[in-house]
Amino acid sequence: MILIVDDTPENLISLKKVLEKNNFEVDTASSGEEALKKVLRNSYVLIILDVQMPGMDGFEVAEAISGYSKTKETAIIFLSAANTEFKFIAKGYSSGGLDYITKPVDMNILLLKVKTFYRIYEQNRKLNEMQKNLLEEIEFRKEAERKKDEFISIASHELKTPLTSVKGYVQLLERSVSKGDTETVKKHLAKAQVQLEKLNSLIADLLDISKIESGKLKFNKQNFSIDQLVDNVIEVMHQSNPDFKIHKKGIANCEIFGDEMRVEQVIINFLTNAIKYSPGTTEIELTLNVKDEQLYLAVKDSGIGMLPEQLAHVFDKFYRVEETSQRFQGLGIGLYISSEIIKRHSGQVGVNSTYGKGSEFYFLMPINSNSDFND
């Protein structure tokens, strides 16, 4: 928008008509004081400023405007009928003006100058926008690099832990075998098996995330009983975590069209996390129902919970809650993989949580997902 400042109404009207005829948006002020008030309220690309005005003259107005941070990109053109000497023109430039035109005004020249200033403004605006986007992109590259380095460090540590444990149990097995101590051999084998299962799970997650990144995560969709799947998962989880009681609430009483193994992977992830992040508790609640052809499954615990600012990132790739990373093992990709699996079933995941009181992870998905996306 252009602001015309002139104490002569005829000048305001004629200039306004010419500029509006050329599709410029125009505002007017009949004094320096009024111009300053308008500059504080509005943003202007260009100010056409008369030099000789009662009260504040054009030079004073320009000097005052130059002190406003919001007007640093605003161009000023001075108009003057009397002050045409070099010293006045020089004062105009030193006051912050970018051009000085003497009256009577050649409208064609003025229009060319206005169009030029508008073009420069647009170019500067685009350059500033490009610079901002570039800086944001650089920061995103830096953050991605930091996350990648952090992930490599975490992955190395997490993979090394079960490997070291297995190595230790193998050494103990060698001693027990040589002594013929069968019971101790069985005990060490069982413990080594637990560590190997952890290692297998970590490697499976790494392979899954690699497939997701490359768009090669495959799905084998068919009809299956979600109630039977949930019951089987609860039974398996109870065998590996006998101290935890998983209470099932509700029933779906229908078949789901989807990849049974992948949906099972999500449910196991939710339950495993609920157990992991609920030290000192012994009960978990799994809710299951179908409404409007949508399956709803939620796992609720009474564990450590999360802060509101953490909830927005919990399904992000490689995200781990900072204060829990030293206490709990994991790569920070299980929930991300679960989220991607549900998305590929045309569903969505979510979480409700209160810090210190527990979390509830859930997903919604159509019971008949016919999407061919990445099948």
Image (cartoon, rainbow, N blue to C red):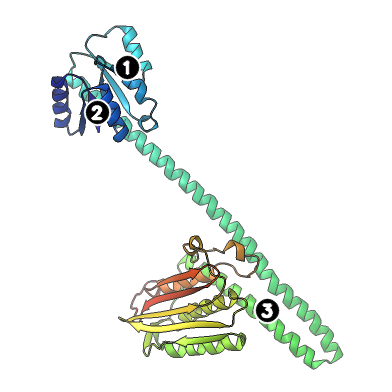
Q: Which of the labelled discs sits on residue 3, or is there none? A: 2
Q: Residue at x 49, y 80 (%)?
A: 267
CA neighbours of label 3 inside 10 A, class few (<14), some (14 to 19), many (20+): some
Amino acid on which disc 2 is placed: Leu
Question: Which of these two is toward me, 40 or 205?
Answer: 40
Would you place residue 46 above or below residue 184 in this image? above
Question: Which of these two is toward me, 36 or 165?
Answer: 36
* Secondary structure found at label 1: helix
Look at discs 3 and 1 and give the one toward the viewer: 1
* Secondary structure found at label 3: helix
Question: Which of these two is toward me, 223 or 359?
Answer: 359
**Mark 3, residue position:** 195
Q: Calculate the distance from the C-alpha at mark 3 to the C-alpha at mark 1.
A: 80 Å
Amino acid on which disc 3 is placed: Gln
Residue at far right of view: 179
Would you place residue 229 above or below residue 125 in this image? below
Percent position (x, y) of residue 159? 66, 70
Q: Calculate the distance from the C-alpha at mark 3 to the C-alpha at mark 2.
A: 74 Å
Amino acid on which disc 1 is placed: Phe
Residue 185 in view (yes/no): yes
